Image: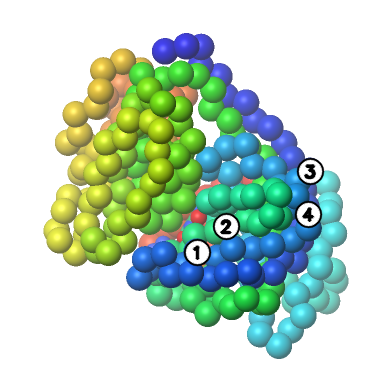
């Protein structure tokens, strides 16, 4: 493994009202929404797990436009603050001024409801990314583990790693119909964990995994308790250096607009 370093790159905070270009059903429970805005010509996204904050207009009410404050967006007094949720830019194309977001359609919640019915010409607010957590280093292997909400970040990572990189990925999905295909250059060992078929859950699968030798970097994301359990397992049972793990809590069972503690 070559020298490991993490670089935190800050980006100027921006808010745009973007327009839906397309809404495709990638799989039964995943909507792929392509958004366009002239400012996406300079859209900054340096890391596979960057996130933007999406703001969903209430039907019939014009989206309030926030100002930039020293520590985030400031909403105008008296205006209704729209519901906001975090999402990963799965792809972006500066020349076409497009950003693609994959939404898990999990049931209820403003983001899911919006994504299930968004159509070309609809608009939503998009802030960020405010920063990128760039992991540098040529690791012996990359462990990627997550549920459907982590698929955009995991898919992006799988596709951006160079030839010769070794990836072992565990992805928990509701049914086999949620499997996606990727376009990797790296050497990828992919394990789909199908809940409907009674496959082991994410935590058990990672616990039972035979990992390649050498030093790896682990990215774990999804439901809060699963991410925390995998992080604990890697540190306590496999003696992985905590600096070589990024375990993120993307949602928590029963929590509306779960706050994972990261800066917005
Ligand atoms: C940094 C970051 C990046 C993320 N990237 C993505 C992404 O690219 N794509 C994506 O789909 N999600 C992503 N998420 C997760 C997404 O923000 C949450 O799932 C969010 O709660 C969805 O909002 P909602 O309005 O649909 O539901 P909410 O109103 O927040 O929640 C309503 C109910 O649904 C439950 N719930 C929330 N999410 C799920 C789920 N996935 N499965 C089952 N139940 C759920 C909640 O526990 C709650 O009971 C990301 C989260 C973070 C922090």
In primary-sequence order, the first of circles 2 and 1 is: 1
Q: Which residue bears the numbered disc 1?
A: 32
Label 1: state its secondary structure: strand
- Dot 3 crowding, Cα within 10 Å, few <14, some 14–19, many 20+: few
In the image, is the residue at mark 3 within 8 Å of ligand 1 by its beta carbon? no
Q: In this figure, which colouring scheme has been used for the structure? A: rainbow
Label 2: state its secondary structure: strand
In primary-sequence order, the first of circles 3 and 1 is: 3
Label 3: state its secondary structure: loop
Task: Say which mark, if any, is on residue 100.
Answer: 2
Separation of residues labelled 2 and 1 (CA atoms): 7 Å
In primary-sequence order, the first of circles 2 and 3 is: 3
Q: How many marks?
A: 4
Circles 3 and 4: CB atoms closer than 8 Å: no
Task: Say which mark, if any, is on residue 39.
Answer: 4
In this orientation, which residue lies closer to the viewer: 104 or 262? 104
Separation of residues labelled 1 and 4 (CA atoms): 20 Å
Task: State which quarter of the image contains the N terminus.
Answer: top left
Residue 22 visible here = yes
Q: Residue at x 46, y 51 (%)?
A: 152
Q: Residue at x 17, y 36 (%)?
A: 208
Q: Which residue bears the numbered disc 3?
A: 12
Label 4: state its secondary structure: helix
Tell me: residue 57, above or below residue 208: below
| Residue 90 in the figure: left or right of residue 42 | left
Q: Residue at x 78, y 58 (%)?
A: 38
Separation of residues labelled 3 and 4 (CA atoms): 12 Å
Camera-near label (2 vs 3) is 2
The image position of residue 235, as x and y in percent, is: 33, 27
């Amino acid at each position: 493994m070559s020298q490991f370093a993490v670089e935190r790159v800050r980006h100027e905070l921006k808010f745009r009202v973007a327009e839906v270009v397309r809404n495709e059903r990638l799989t039964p429970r995943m909507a792929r929404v392509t958004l366009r805005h002239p400012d996406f010509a300079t859209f900054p996204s340096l890391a596979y797990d960057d996130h933007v904050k999406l703001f969903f207009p209430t039907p019939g009410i014009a989206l309030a436009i926030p100002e930039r404050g020293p520590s985030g967006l400031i909403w105008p007094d008296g205006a209704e603050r729209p519901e906001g949720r975090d999402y990963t830019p799965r792809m972006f194309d500066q020349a076409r001024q497009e950003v693609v977001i994959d939404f898990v359609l999990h049931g209820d919640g403003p983001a899911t409801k919006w994504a299930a019915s968004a159509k070309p010409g609809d608009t939503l607010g998009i802030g960020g990314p405010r920063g990128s957590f760039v992991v540098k280093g040529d690791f012996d292997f990359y462990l990627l583990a997550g549920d459907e909400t982590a698929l955009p970040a995991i898919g992006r990572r799988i596709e951006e790693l160079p030839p010769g990189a070794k990836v072992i990925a565990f992805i928990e999905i509701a049914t086999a119909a949620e499997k996606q295909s990727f376009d990797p250059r790296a050497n990828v060992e992919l394990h789909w964990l199908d809940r409907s078929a009674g496959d082991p859950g994410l935590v058990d699968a990672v616990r039972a995994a035979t990992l390649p030798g050498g030093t790896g970097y682990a990215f774990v994301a999804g439901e809060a308790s699963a991410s925390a359990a995998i992080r604990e397992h890697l540190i306590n049972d496999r003696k992985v250096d905590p600096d070589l793990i990024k375990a993120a809590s993307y949602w928590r069972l029963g929590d509306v607009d779960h706050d994972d503690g990261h800066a917005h």
